[in-house]
Image: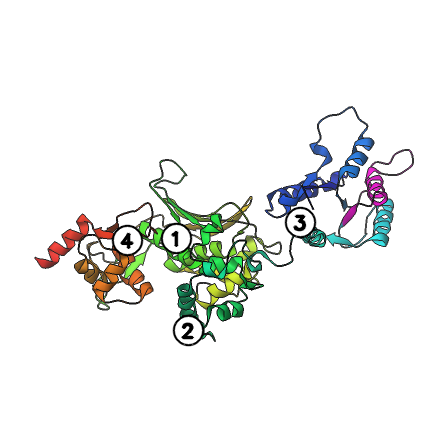
Amino acid sequence: MTGKGRIFVSSVQKELAAERRAVRDFMEGDPLLRRFFHVFLFEDLPASGQRPDDLYLGEVDRAAIYLGLFGKEYGHEDETGVSPTEHEFDRATVSGKERLIFVKGSDDKDRHPKMKALIDKASDQLNRRRFGNITELTALVYASLVEYLVAKGAVYTRPFDASACPGATIDDLSREKVGDFLERAQQSRGYALGPDTAMDKALAHLNLLDHDRPSHAAILLFGREPQRFLISSEVKCLHFHGREVRKPIPSYQIYRGTVFELVDQAVDFVMSKINRSVGTRAEGPTAPVTYELPRDAVAEAIVNAVAHRDYASHASVQVMLFSDRLEVWNPGHLPPTLTPDLLRVPHASIPHNPLLADPLFLTRYIEKAGTGTLDIIALCEEAGLRPPAFRQDGGQFVQTLWRPVSEVTPEVTTEVTTEVTTEVGKALEAMKGEMARKEMQEALGLKNDEHFRKAYLVPALEEGLIEMTIPDKPNSRLQKYRLTAKGRAWLAGRKS
């Protein structure tokens, strides 16, 4: 199949005008279908001196596919008693066009007799599908066109995350990252394979190989440099002081890495920017910390975006923090059977990328029971926040978490902001000039990278006690860390 195939959508029934436009808009917004098809609607044509009947039939002749939307009305009849809709269907039949027929309504009650006869004629020649609303229609159109593309050999039947990543080999995967995942999966879910499992066996067990080649999911999960193959898989994090997108942007970071690293980095970005309160040590040796947005809710929203986004899209996940809200945007549409309202009630889990979702589940980044949005709602309610919002904005799905209207937290007694944990204190004392991450770990005698990052490095950065030497490239191999003026003052105060 070369070039874009033209799809002629039956054109003159006024009762189905909204459905025709919805089909066109859906196909133009879908990253797969828009690569292969161009939709023709008669109302999009400029004024012409040609007879309408000639225009209809001429467009049918030029189309690769005739897509018939049949409703209750039959339409205007010519001198022979035949409507343009039936002329179009007959022309497509004689010309040997691919014909896809969709009938509105579950029965033929109140349907025009001639339309019912046309539906019967179509049913005798091919399978036709019934729909009740636009959501059902677009889902049926999508499934039919994918079947057409598969039959033509234009696409493979394997989903995107299961298909081989072009140009990638096993050498592009990190054995260390696979081992770390297996260790966490075994600890978190009792996964059958241990960290010493051979990489090819581990990948096969997770269904991440396509004829011995790493799949897109394998690269996203364990790639040494995932963005080398999937450029838009990065996450963009932006912080605005006001309620609107305005330049200059006070803080803007682009994070790269595996899906695990993307989630961790994006969550850390948000948590480092929002307000927090440090309580007293009355209830234990460590002062409790309360964030204005629940960390688990922030993490759930971000992992949802990374796990369920459309990786065929050229857009990236965007995490935007405003003065009144956090917005998480991810490319793609909700499954046809789900709506934003249905996300507020118990619903089935329909992962867009099932081979990504499974490893994220095994490491407890997500649950597979369709509870993600429900957990966000519950966590925000427990924190006394406004209910989160979910919406489909064109080709982007948006999750919004609302920040508190007031920063007053009367139940928490705040200490000075330079109060730090024992771990952070040890990290500051170990700092000697500019140090790489590995050097800091060795100075502290720590071997576990993740523990060091979460207990020592990230809290010290969030408190502004240390800083990066290359802040605009947080993942640079040349990255080092040094004490800030605040960090030096804390050390001085400790020694005095």
What whole-number distance in Å separates the C-alpha atoms at marks 4 and 2? 35 Å
Q: Judging from the image, what secondary structure is the residue with disc 4 in? A: helix
Quadrant of the rendered structure where residue 55 is? top right
Residue ID at (24%, 59%): 439
Q: Give SS at disc 1.
A: helix
Q: Residue at x 65, y 50 (%)?
A: 135
**Amino acid type, callout 3:** Thr
Specify start and end residues of the magenta stretch as a single range: 72-101
Q: Verify whether residue 92 appears in magenta.
A: yes
Q: CA distance from mark 3 to mark 4?
A: 46 Å
Along the polypeptide, which appears first: circle 4 or circle 1?
1
Q: Residues within 10 Å of mark 3 (few under 14, many from 20)?
A: many
Instruction: Choose top left, top right, bottom left or bottom right for residue 27.
Output: top right
Q: Position of residue 80 (x, y in %)?
A: 92, 36
**Secondary structure state at the residue bearing disc 2:** loop
Q: Secondary structure at mark 3?
A: helix
For this view, does 478 lie left or right of residue 63?
left
* Residue at x 50%, y 67% (from the top left corner): 203
Q: Residue under label 1, please give it.
A: 266
Q: Is residue 170 above or below residue 197?
A: above
Q: Which residue is mark 4?
A: 462
Q: Tell me if residue 62 comes above or below residue 453 in the rendering.
A: above
Name the mark on residue 196. Answer: 2
Nearer the observer: mark 1 or 3; the answer is 1
Which of the colour schemes (rainbow, by chain, secondary structure, one colour) is used? rainbow
Q: Going from the N terminus, do you reach mark 4 or mark 2 first? A: 2
Name the amino acid, label 2. Asp
The residue pinned by badge 3 equals 138
Question: Do the CB atoms of the residues marked 4 and 1 lie less than 8 Å apart?
Answer: no
